[in-house]
Image: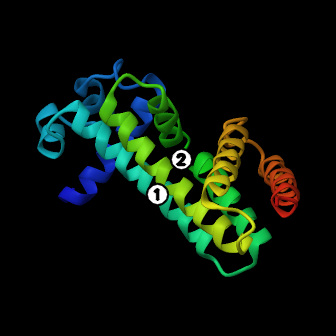
Amino acid sequence: MRAPERRAQLLAVARQVFGRAGFHSVSMDTVAKEAGVTKPILYDHFTSKKDLYLALLDADLSNLLDRVKEALASPIGNRERIRASFQAYFDFVDEHAEGFQLLMQETVGTERDFRDRVGAVRDQILNEVADLIVRESRGRLDREHAETVALALIGMVETVAQRDPGGPAETRRAAVDTLVQFAWRGITNLA
């Protein structure tokens, strides 16, 4: 297996292992064994368990951020932009359950480097959503109020997405529809 393919395989296995047991409960031996490689091969790609875990966080955070930014940038109207961004978040949770679990663990984790990485991406998403709200409100909402609304939207979607991740697609779509309806009514009645 070539180096990029091996690295991707090791990340996929590590994501599952860390997703099940968390950072502190997993050893490099466990990851190597589950990946069907020796520890030296694992260490050829990642210098430490922390390095491996940071690579996982970076990959998952990048994936999530790209999905949300793409949805927010789509020129399909504000209500559908809201739907697309909510759906992007739900899709990430459903398609990458282990990655999502890692991100949620690190919001309250003990490792500052991990929390800082997750927090930085959360701040980026918050800024993207707040920028959109300020722009689309055409002066009705200032930046401070837009950030409050953005934080509420993000928290709402994040919380609901955690309920039954990977559940029936119809149920997940219905949850997104409910959130969009709720958010749209609230946003359009501000200011």
Can residue 157 be seen here? Answer: yes
Q: Residue at x 46, y 32 (%)?
A: 19
The quadrant of the picture occupied by the N terminus is bottom left
Residue 58 percent location from the top left of the image:
35, 49
Residue 107 image point, x, y percent: 48, 32
7 or 151: nearer the eye? 151
Q: Which mark is residue 80?
A: none
- The residue located at (37%, 22%) in the rendering is 110
The answer to whether 79 is drawn above or below residue 89 in the figure is below
Report the side of 155 relative to 77 (left or right).
left
Q: Is residue 181 left or right of residue 139?
A: right
**Where does the image place residue 133, in percent across and percent down from the top left?**
67, 65
Q: Earlier in the sequence, mark 2 or mark 1?
A: 1
11, 52: nearer the viewer: 52
**Do callouts 2 and 1 mark residues in contact (Cβ within 8 Å)?**
yes
Image coords of residue 86 (percent x, y): 69, 56
Name the mark on residue 96.
2
Camera-nearest residue between 47 and 178:
178
Q: Which amino acid type corresponds to the residue marked 2 in the rendered image? A: His
Dot 1 amino acid type = Asn
Question: Is 91 situated above or below 83?
Answer: above
Residue sitting at x 69%, y 58%: 87
- Relative vertical location of residue 58 with respect to residue 87 in this rendering, above or below: above
Q: Nearer the viewer, mark 2 or mark 1?
A: 1
Extreme residue in the bottom direction: 75
Name the foreground residue: 97 vs 155. 155
- The residue beneath circle 1 is 63
Whole-Å distance between the Cαs marked 2 and 1? 10 Å
* Residue furthest top in the image: 25
